[in-house]
Amino acid sequence: MGDVTPKGSEEVEARLARVRCFLLDMDGTLYLGRRLLPGARRFLQVLRRQGKSFLILTNNSSQDSAAYAEKLARLGLPVVPDQILTSGEATALYLRRHHPGARLFVVGTPALEAIFTAYGFTLTDEDPDLVVVGFDTTLTYAKLWKLCDFVRAGLPYIATHPDLNCPTETGYMPDIGAIIAFVRASTGREPDRIIGKPNPEMVEAVLVRTGLLPADLCMVGDRLYTDIALGSRAGILTVLVLTGEARLEDLPHTPHRPDLVLPDLGALADLLEPGEQRKPPSSRWEDRKAVFGRTNLQDSDP
């Protein structure tokens, strides 16, 4: 890595100190598969010690918030369902606001179907009002075929999120973006609305849930085109962690510039530690330095 001497670091650190709630991605940021990522537990401990809150945002719509809370608890992170917002729930909130009482054809897991049922929607594969696509780990060719028929017929077409891949301990698994690409190849249509990160519907759900303003928030995640893009578009401070999809060499080529780039959540915990408890980046990461400021990323070498 070339010279990444911080530029504008004082401004970024001042904004970081004013953050009241951290928005945290899950897959690739807190954990991968069944493995807790470095610094995740200590980061949440630092937040609790400093009286700061957090809300976990996940585009993964294959499960509900209760299932994710249980998984995090098994990994040693005590989190309650209300501290998790999935793209599936954000989609249900959006549809309840804009299409109340609609009959839905849902391409998703039983957990996603249950979310829409809980929000009062009727699920059907016959004459629906609109179609909803999620990250369906129970996907079948029959579902894809029926989905394409409905999309080709012109029904409103909603996707819970845009992610191309879902990071795992061994690499990646195809996410909803692969399903969207299949439908595009067959029908020529893109979704009429995509709800999850980085789209404004997800931000709206966050602001309602937290009661805060964008200036009070910080988005932390591993994906440039979802996590960082969401924060940048909404005026929210952004931190990219290099524990998931994005790599340092991606930074000069992306339009989504994070305010701060760190190896992991442990490094972010170091920055939040007050005074004598805080470790300088050079001692924490050896030769890996923090990268501050969007303009600086244009000057750094991969």
Image (cartoon, rainbow, N blue to C red):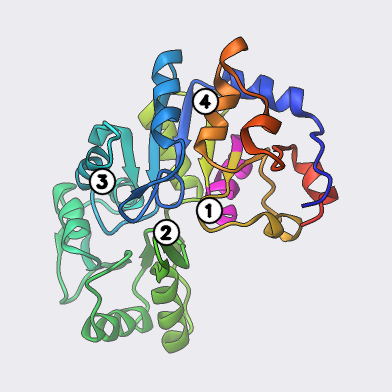
Q: Disc 1 vs disc 2: which is toward the camera?
A: 1
Mark 2 lies on residue: 161
- Closer to the chain start, of discs 2 and 4, is 2
Q: Amino acid at mark 3?
A: Tyr
Give x and y (percent) for residue 231.
58, 41
The magenta stretch is 222-238
The answer for how far apart the CA atoms under marks 4 and 1 are is: 20 Å
Give x and y (percent) for residue 179.
39, 75
Quadrant housing residue 282: top right
Which residue shows up at 18% across the image and 59% down it? 113
Q: Tell whether position 229 is magenta.
A: yes
At label 4, counting other C-alpha atoms closer than 10 Å, the crowd grade (few under 14, some 14-19, many 20 or more) is: some
Eyeballing the image, is 173 above or below 8? below
Mark 3 lies on residue: 68
Mark 4 lies on residue: 213
Helix, strand or loop at label 4? It is: loop
Eyeballing the image, is 39 above or below 174? above
Helix, strand or loop at label 3? It is: helix
In front of the other: 286 or 56: 286
At label 3, counting other C-alpha atoms closer than 10 Å, the crowd grade (few under 14, some 14-19, many 20 or more) is: many
In front of the other: 135 or 302: 302
> Residue 253: which numbered mark, if any?
none
Quadrant housing residue 84: top left
Question: Do the CB atoms of the residues marked 4 and 3 lie less than 8 Å apart?
Answer: no
The answer for how far apart the CA atoms under marks 2 and 3 are is: 17 Å
Residue 55 located left or right of residue 262: left
Eyeballing the image, is 187 above or below 165? below
The answer for how far apart the CA atoms under marks 2 and 4 are is: 23 Å
Q: Disc 1 vs disc 3: which is toward the camera?
A: 3
- Closer to the chain start, of discs 4 and 3, is 3
Mark 1 lies on residue: 226
Give x and y (percent) for residue 279.
62, 23
